[in-house]
Image (cartoon, rainbow, N blue to C red):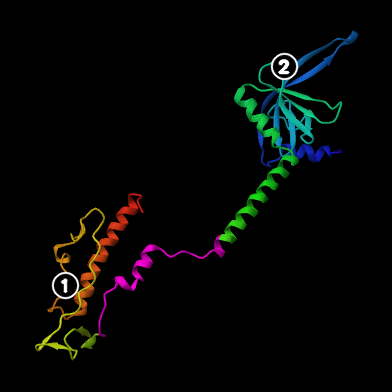
């Protein structure tokens, strides 16, 4: 692979985001006369950008002294005389392996993790997995939209005609109010009282027939009586009970109990 040295040097030192950076010691094989060779380590400043690993003589250096293209390689721990060593090995036979040494266990693990995720092959796997998860999420969302929504139990309760007050005949409005004694039916010259509303269920924990907690004494008895001739009074009485039930529901929501 041919790289433009000037463009690469500019990319190494420009303000583009850096994936990882830090000091590492790079192993160098030194060959001497008479076939002898020795091993030494050079401390270099390494900068990882994408799949390119640059290394500089010093942190303030303006030009890199070397570059490693992280494609077709594996990053693994290795046995070396130095502690916290790992190696970058390439798949091609005879390719040079880079042995690097970190300053500690945490630094070594961070470098191995960052270098292992730098190649385009790894990014392809990540993108493929994300596309699969997105497809599954879209399929699940489409199935939820097609399924019919279930109505809540409270809605079914309010829509149950058996639980609503039964009115034998439509009320006759008189001066904007509903009166019970305006009908032709009389009992000994007196108006018949309206039918009693259905018996309410007591609140949880209270015995049947006892008033629910939070209700005022005025709400313990029904206002429906022969003296009740005003719809506004009925509306006010039932509205008080609904307000109490709403406050109880809000308190249960705050405590985390549905």
Question: Which span is picked out in magenta?
Answer: 144-170
Q: Nearer the viewer, mark 2 or mark 1?
A: 1
Query: Are the residues tagged 2 and 1 within 8 Å (C-beta)?
Result: no
Q: Is residue 241 above or below residue 233?
A: above
In this orientation, does residue 221 appear? Answer: yes
Check if residue 240 falls in the magenta segment: no
Q: How packed is label 2: few (under 14 Cα within 10 Å), some, or many (20 or more)?
A: few
Q: Residue furthest left?
A: 188
SS for tag 2? loop
Residue 235 in the image: state x and y as whole percent: 23, 74
Q: Residue furthest bottom?
A: 184
In this orientation, does residue 21 appear? Answer: no
Residue 112 in the image: state x and y as whole percent: 67, 29
Q: Is residue 185 left or right of residue 100?
A: left
State the residue position of label 2: 80
Decide which of 181, 73 is in the foreground and name it: 181
Q: Is residue 253 above or below residue 161?
A: above
Q: Residue furthest right?
A: 34
Residue visible at 82% across and 26% down in the picture? 96
Q: Is residue 15 left or right of residue 163?
A: right
Check if residue 159 falls in the magenta segment: yes
State the residue position of label 1: 223
SS for tag 1? loop
**In the rendered structure, which disc, 2 or 1, sits on the residue that comes first in sequence?**
2
* Residue 2, quarter of the rendered image: top right
């Amino acid at each position: 692979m041919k790289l433009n040295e000037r463009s690469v040097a500019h990319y190494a030192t420009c303000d583009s985001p850096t994936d990882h950076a830090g000091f590492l010691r790079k192993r160098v094989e030194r060959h001497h006369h008479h076939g002898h060779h020795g091993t030494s380590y050079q401390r270099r400043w390494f900068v990882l950008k994408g799949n390119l690993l640059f290394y500089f003589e010093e942190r303030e250096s303006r030009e890199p002294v070397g570059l490693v293209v992280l494609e077709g390689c594996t990053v693994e721990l290795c046995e070396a005389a130095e502690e916290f060593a790992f190696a970058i090995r390439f798949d091609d036979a005879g390719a040079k392996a880079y042995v690097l040494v970190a300053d500690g266990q945490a630094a070594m693990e961070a470098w191995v993790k960052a270098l292992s995720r730098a190649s385009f092959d790894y990014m392809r796997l990540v993108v493929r997995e994300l596309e699969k998860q997105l497809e599954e999420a879209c399929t699940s969302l489409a199935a939820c939209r097609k399924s019919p929504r279930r109505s809540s139990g409270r809605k079914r309760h309010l829509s149950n005609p058996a639980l609503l007050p039964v009115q034998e005949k439509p009320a006759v409005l008189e001066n904007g109010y509903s009166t019970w004694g305006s009908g032709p039916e009389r009992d000994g010259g007196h108006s018949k009282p309206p039918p009693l509303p259905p018996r309410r269920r007591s609140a949880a924990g209270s015995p049947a027939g006892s008033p629910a907690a939070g209700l005022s004494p005025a709400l313990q008895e029904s206002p429906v009586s022969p003296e009740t001739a005003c719809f506004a009074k009925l509306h006010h009485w039932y509205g008080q009970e609904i307000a109490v039930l709403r406050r109880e529901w809000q308190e249960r929501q705050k405590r985390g109990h549905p």
